[in-house]
Structure formats: structure tokens, C-alpha cells
Amino acid sequence: MARQLAVQVHNAGGSLRVLSTKPMPGTQWIQALTSVGCRVEICTEPKTILSVEDIVSLIGTKCDGVIGQLTEDWGDTLFGALKKAGGHAYSNMAVGYNNVDVDAATRHGISVGNTPGVLTETTAELAASLTLAAARRVVEADDFMRAGKYEGWLPTLFVGNLLKGQTVGIIGAGRIGTAYARMMVEGFKMNVIYYDLYQSTRLEKFVSAYGEFLKSQGEAPVHWRRASSPEEVLKEADVISLHPVLDKTTYHLINKERLALMKKEAVLVNASRGPVVDEVALVEHLKANPMFRVGLDVFEDEPYMKPGLGDLPNAVVVPHIASASKWTREGMATLAAQNVAAKLKGYPVWPNSNNIEPFLDENNPAPAAAPSIVNAKALGLPVGDGKTKAKL
Ligand SMILES: NC(=O)c1ccc[n+]([C@@H]2O[C@H](COP(=O)([O-])OP(=O)(O)OC[C@H]3O[C@@H](n4cnc5c(N)ncnc54)[C@H](O)[C@@H]3O)[C@@H](O)[C@H]2O)c1
Ligand SMILES: O=C(O)[C@H](O)CO
């Protein structure tokens, strides 16, 4: 028999049972659920990644909704178990939902929520940090200093790349890609080349307007260009940051052939999903090109790195922390809880999942709506007018 996993219970008398597979930061998310009559059970097992079997046992025989994590495999087995337990609602505590089989959820009549917007700036800031750390060799220099190797200033010590006036390439110019591009344009006066399936008029207008501003200050303007292929971006840019969703079209988007197109001293940053990069090919490329540098927040086989990557001085590696600011993580938890609470209460879906601010204001009641349900259309869920306030 499966072992009983430890849980912490809030509002034990609540009639709707909602499970969170992990403790999450803040308390607003718990309040969002208990205030609408949910009993909240939080799995407190120290094991980092729960297996499908673990989660099936947590779901048990009666469960109305679940908040899960991107490390979990939400497919037919889990949605089948949730349906059998009487469940209707699931939310990832993440904007990316490549760990979720949305079609399976839809087949079982279960809504799938995600947490867009609240992590846009935080994630872009980490991508910018990785860019600087890689371009200016911050981690190598830190290691050197701590190892007691510093014997005095030298003209040749840890020489890296200047960003100002260079070209930043964005692959996937959605919410995060655009926010990152703006940071690099405003912060370092970089020109932009981007590739996305869709035109980013917001980004284009911003760069044009900022270019005009710089001109008005007597400075060289910045420019943008929309590329017609990823190859164009890779050939032209000095820094490339990857921000697409992970799907069949972006799996190994950066491979051996495309790495070979990049400038020998380019900087590549990935804070999207690990499998967007062929990590074995990347290790080979880094070995052969010591002046090529990467900043990685995500890995192909998380939590593992491909052999050799961790030994390379031209790679900066951090453990998937791009969204890890307090405000963002609390906001992600709140949005995930509201996705579940709203579905269980029969509220409509919020009309614009890019505008989630009203859900995060602790001083005002959250809208009586689900912030972001990715299979709302497939399930035929009603869409609200974006005005109705919840009665708490
Ligand atoms: N490392 C982290 O902690 C972290 C944090 C947040 C998000 N993410 C990842 O970042 C991704 C993007 O988040 P977002 O909020 O900006 O999403 P988004 O939907 O706003 O942007 C994704 C963009 O990718 C584009 N795209 C899709 N297929 C493409 C292709 N084949 N080539 C080029 N572009 C393509 C889309 O058109 C869209 O503009 C998420 O899906 C998630 O996987 C990672
Ligand atoms: O997709 C996401 O939201 C991240 O990977 C975690 O913040």
C-alpha cells in the first residue's frame, strides 16, 4: 500500500477539498481558497519532485481541485485520478505548462490554469543578470578572488564584452522576451533583432520611441529589426536570449548547426525551458569556443546538467530561479489559487490574461473570475466582462 504523505490542513471544515502539491510562499493564496469554502491541504513532504504515484495518493477519493508544479507530470493518469475524485480544476504554479497534457485535462473536463504576467519582469531581470554575468565573467572572477589568486590589477584580467551599442537578439518576443529586450535597450542602448511567429508591435514601437529620445539627447539612436528566421538572429546578434514556449517547434531550436552560425564571442542566455537547447551540442560548442559564453537558468534534464557543462568556465549556471522574487512567487501562488477557486465557484474566465494586476491587489477584493485558464475555449467556459468583483 502507498505510504501516506504528510499534509498541512487549513480550514478543515471546508466543503471543497483543494490540494497543493507543495508549500507556496505567502498566505494570500490560502485565503483566496479558504474564503470561498475550500479545505486546503498542502503536501509538506521534503521530497523535491513528487511522482505520479505520490500525487495519485494525495488526490485520494475526494478532491475538487489541485495546484501543481512544473516538475510534475500532469498527464492522463493524474487528470483521470482527479476526475474520479470529483475534481474540476487544476492550475500549474507557473506560466509555462509544457509539463501538462492539456488535451488530457480537457478530455476529463478539467480546467488548466497558469500564472502569466506576474513573473514577466522578474524573469527578464534574471535573464539580464545572466547576460551581464556571462558577458563580464562575473562568476569566473568571483571564483578567482575567493581562491586567493588575485595578485593585483592587470590590463588583461577577465576581459569580457561591452554591451553598449551591440545587438541583442530575442527568440520568442512574448511577454518576457519583450520585457528583457526593453531592459537591454534602456540599460545598455543595444539594438534589437528578434524572431517570433508573431510581430511584436509593442517592442517595435518602444525601440523606435527610445531611439527618437536618444536622438533628441544628441546620442546615437537604437534600432530594431524583425528577422524572418532564427538563423538571422543567431548570425547577427552579439547577445541572444531565448524566451519562447517549449513545444515541438522549439525543441532543440538551438542545435549544433545553429550554434555554429553564432559569433565566436557571442553570449547565449536561456531562461525559457532546457530542451529549447541541445545541451550536448552546447557543451561541445563551449569547449571548442572558449570566448563564447552562456548563462543558463534551465537545463535539458533538470535537475541534472549534461556531462561536462558544470566544469566549463564559460558557462554561468543557476538552478531555475528566474521567477524567484518574493513578490512574484507570492503572486504566482495567488494566481494559481484563484484559477482553482474561481473554477470551483463557477466564475467566468478573465477576458485578458495579460492584465492580472487586479488579482494581486491585497487591499481590494479580487475579481470574481479565473485569471488564466489555457483550455477555457476547449471547455466552453464563459468569459467575463472584466468588471465583476468577488464577494468575499
Ligand atoms: N526560467 C523560468 O523560471 C521561467 C519563468 C517564466 C517563464 N519561463 C518560460 O518562458 C516562456 C515564455 O513565457 P512568456 O510569459 O513570455 O510567454 P509568452 O506566451 O508571452 O511568450 C512566448 C513567445 O514564444 C513565441 N513562440 C512560440 N513558438 C515559437 C517559435 N517556434 N519560434 C519563436 N517564437 C515562438 C510565441 O509567439 C510568444 O510570443 C514560458 O512558456 C516558460 O516556459 C521560464
Ligand atoms: O514557467 C514558469 O513559470 C517558470 O519556469 C517558473 O517560474
Image (spheres, rainbow, N blue to C red):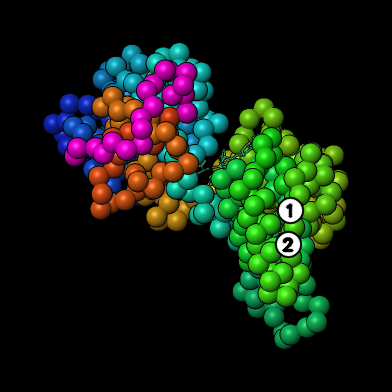
Could you tell me which secondary element the residue under label 2 belongs to? Answer: loop
Q: Does any portion of residue 251 appear in the rendered image? A: yes
Magenta extent: 374-392
**In front: 339, or 270?**
339
| Residue type marked 2 | Val
Quarter of the image for the N terminus: give it. Answer: top left
**In front: 176, or 242?**
176
Coordinates of residue 175 in the picture (x, y in percent)? 56, 45
**In front: 177, or 102?**
177
Examine the rendered structure and indicate whether residue 152 appears above or below residue 340. Answer: below
Tell me if residue 285 is in the magenta stretch.
no
Residue under circle 2?
222
Tell me which residue sits at (68%, 71%) in the image: 216
* Residue at far left of view: 13
| Residue type marked 1 | Trp
Tell me which residue sits at (49%, 39%) in the image: 95
Residue under circle 1?
224
Specify whether tag 2 is near ligand 1 (CB below 8 Å).
Answer: no
* Magenta stretch secondary structure, dominant: loop
Tell me if residue 376 is in the magenta stretch.
yes
Disc 1/disc 2 C-alpha distance (Å): 7 Å
Q: Residues within 10 Å of mark 1 (few under 14, many from 20)?
A: many
Coordinates of residue 227 in the picture (x, y in percent)? 78, 43
Quarter of the view holding residue 138:
bottom right
Coordinates of residue 9 in the picture (x, y in percent)? 22, 37
Asked whether the residues under the numbered discs 1 and 2 touch, taking CB atoms below 8 Å apart as contact, a structural biologist would say: yes
